[in-house]
Amino acid sequence: MSFYQETLGYKEFDYAQFFNRVTREDIGRILYQNRLSELDYLALLSPAAEECLEEMAQRAHRLTVQHFGRVILLYTPMYLANYCVNQCVYCGFGRQNPIERQKLTLEEVAAEAKMIAATGLKHILILTGESRQHAPVSYIRDCVKVLKQYFTSISIEIYPLAEGEYKELIAAGVDGLTLYQEVYDEEVYGQLHLAGPKRDYRWRLEGPERACRAGIRTVNVGALLGLHNWRSEAFFSGLHANYLQNRYTDVEVSISPPRMRPHAGGFPPRVVIRDKNLVQYILAFRLFMPRGGITLSTRESALLRDRLLKLGITKMSAGSCTAVGGRILGEEPTGQFDISDDRDVRAMAHMLYSQGYQPVFKDWQTLE
């Protein structure tokens, strides 16, 4: 049994028919329930719920303050390598794109880590393209050992691993996993992943479960918005997070709602996701999972991130760079995608203070 079986239960689900039945009165009733069902969550993602965003926002804000306080955890991504064997039409690192391929040496990893640590950040997310040849688990493990000298929390966003491989990285110092399914609709998934191991939908989908069984502390899941209907993708992202939280109660589970950004491949969004849609997704998820984390990255503009802050966000990136060695190498290498909010850590902290929030640089320390 895995989340894959859960998705099969909605394979023939008629979303249009369901949404046509949802009324404003239904939304009003759902808003003040203490515990929401899966279909309650889906109703909050419906067109009818767009009329109730202000009420949803007020409740989402209260729930977030109740469970998380007025704090935002800050982190930053660090790209170790951009070699990739997959042909994913929406990704700047796809093997079909003629970009310069790079991989940091351990000395370069230490140099960039030192630069990031100087900003005060203690949480980092490391990323690679999907190439076991150029970025094997052994390389990632060695990088983690270097990074442990500078950071108290290290998360990974890499190719899906076997349970034993997750255990190996956890033993080296990894405590978090980000693994986006990209698109939950299995048929559409096949259309967008043309070649490479990432074509294996189920292996990727069940990756977070393998990490949970291996003993990971935090897991972050989600869909890349713009690849398919946003309402159903938001629905499955929430169901996935809820499934993991219920099954692995010791794991801290969160979602991210990333929207597509310009990238080297030039593949345009299949679906335009408006700001209003993003707001509705964030609010609906907060009401569905009051204790679930919500991460908002620099894919979104500074103005929008400032405005979304009080609607349920718990974690934000700062001082981001999506290129390998982008902070320490003299040239301007190609990033995975263009960021929108380029504020550094100090500017982000100032923004949070100005809105009555406390930036958190460290909220986790392993026992030595």
Image (cartoon, helix red, strand yellow):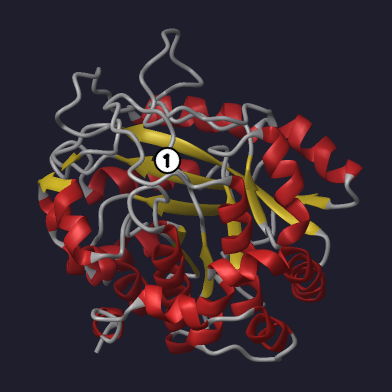
The residue under the point 33% across, 27% down is 104
Q: Where in the figure is residue 27, as x and y percent of width and height?
A: 66, 81
Q: Quadrant of the N terminus?
A: bottom left
- Tell me, yes or no, if residue 124 can be seen here: yes
Q: Where in the figure is residue 98, as x and y percent of width and height?
A: 19, 19
- Tell me, yes or no, if residue 361 can be seen here: no
The residue under the point 37% across, 57% down is 180
Using the image as rendered, state which of residue 286 and residue 52 is in the foreground.
52
Q: Is residue 78 left or right of residue 115?
A: left
Q: Which residue is mark 1?
A: 260
Q: Is residue 87 left or right of residue 129?
A: left
Q: Quadrant of residue 270?
A: top left
Q: Where in the figure is residue 198, as x and y percent of width and height?
A: 17, 53
The residue under the point 29% across, 73% down is 210
Q: Quadrant of residue 298?
A: top right
Q: Is residue 273 left or right of residue 15?
A: right
35 up-or-down from 305: above or below:
below
273 up-or-down from 78: above or below:
below
Q: Where in the figure is residue 253, as x and y percent of width and height?
A: 52, 71
Q: Quadrant of residue 30?
A: bottom right
Using the image as rendered, state which of residue 245 and residue 218 is in the foreground.
245
Q: Amino acid at mark 1?
A: Met
